[in-house]
Each structure stands twice: as C-alpha cells, then as structure tokens.
Image (tube, helix red, strand yellow):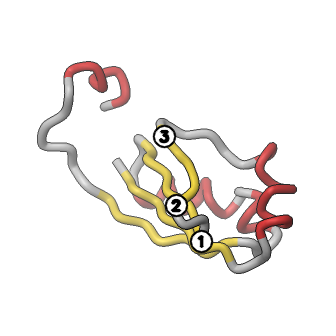
Amino acid sequence: MVIITSKYVKPLDVIDSLLADHRKFICSGPQNPRVGGAIIANVGIDEAREIMKKDPFTIHGAAEYSFIEFIPGSHDPRFACFLK
C-alpha cells in the first residue's frame, strides 16, 4: 500500500481545471490548507510511480509527488476489501 502526497506547483485554477481527469484511488483529497493532496493506493511503490506519470497533474506540471510504501499491520475490518 502506498501513501502519495502532492505539492501543487501551479495556481489552484489550473489544479481545478484538471480535477475531472485526475485518477481515482481508495481515498484521495486535498490537504488543508489546499497546498497539495493525499492519496491512498493499494499498489506497490513502483506501480504507484508509473500510475502518477500518467496523471494530468504530472503531465501538465501542476504537482510534484512523494511516495511512502507501507505494509498495513492492522486495520478496521470494514477496510478489508481494500487490502490485498
């Protein structure tokens, strides 16, 4: 599983114009304050990097990404369907 964080490097009007094509994951949304975003993805770190290369924020130079891979040690049973 990977946590992906982004830092916006273009104005919010550019970010907003790209949201419709922005990829969907288990959970994603803007940080507060809105300086970037956060994503939880049930993939390995290499796959996460490949996916984000095709993301509209990357293609248009609107955000920079950081990746943290982790192995869930415990979880609420309601989230079992999201784990491999």
Q: Which mark identifies residue 27?
A: 3
80 relative to 43, above or below = above
Secondary-structure class at tag 1: loop
Furthest residue in direction front, as rendered: 33
The location of residue 16, given as percent across then percent down, is 80, 56
CA separation, marks 3 and 1? 18 Å
Q: How many marks?
A: 3
Rendered residue at 48%/64% (across/down): 5
Rendered residue at 40%/56% (across/down): 3
Rendered residue at 30%/26% (across/down): 79
Mark 2–mark 1 CB contact (< 8 Å): yes
Could you say which is closer to the camera, residue 68 or residue 29?
Answer: 29
The mark nearer the N terminus, 3 or 1, is 3
> Which amino acid type is shown beneath numbered disc 1?
Val
Secondary-structure class at tag 3: strand
Judged left or right of residue 59, residue 67 is: left
> Which amino acid type is shown beneath numbered disc 3?
Cys
Label 2: which residue? 31
> Which amino acid type is shown beneath numbered disc 2?
Gln
The location of residue 22, given as percent across then percent down, is 72, 49
The location of residue 38, given as percent across then percent down, is 49, 57
Label 1: which residue? 35
The location of residue 11, given as percent across then percent down, is 79, 74
Q: Quadrant of residue 6?
A: bottom right
Rendered residue at 48%/36% (across/down): 26
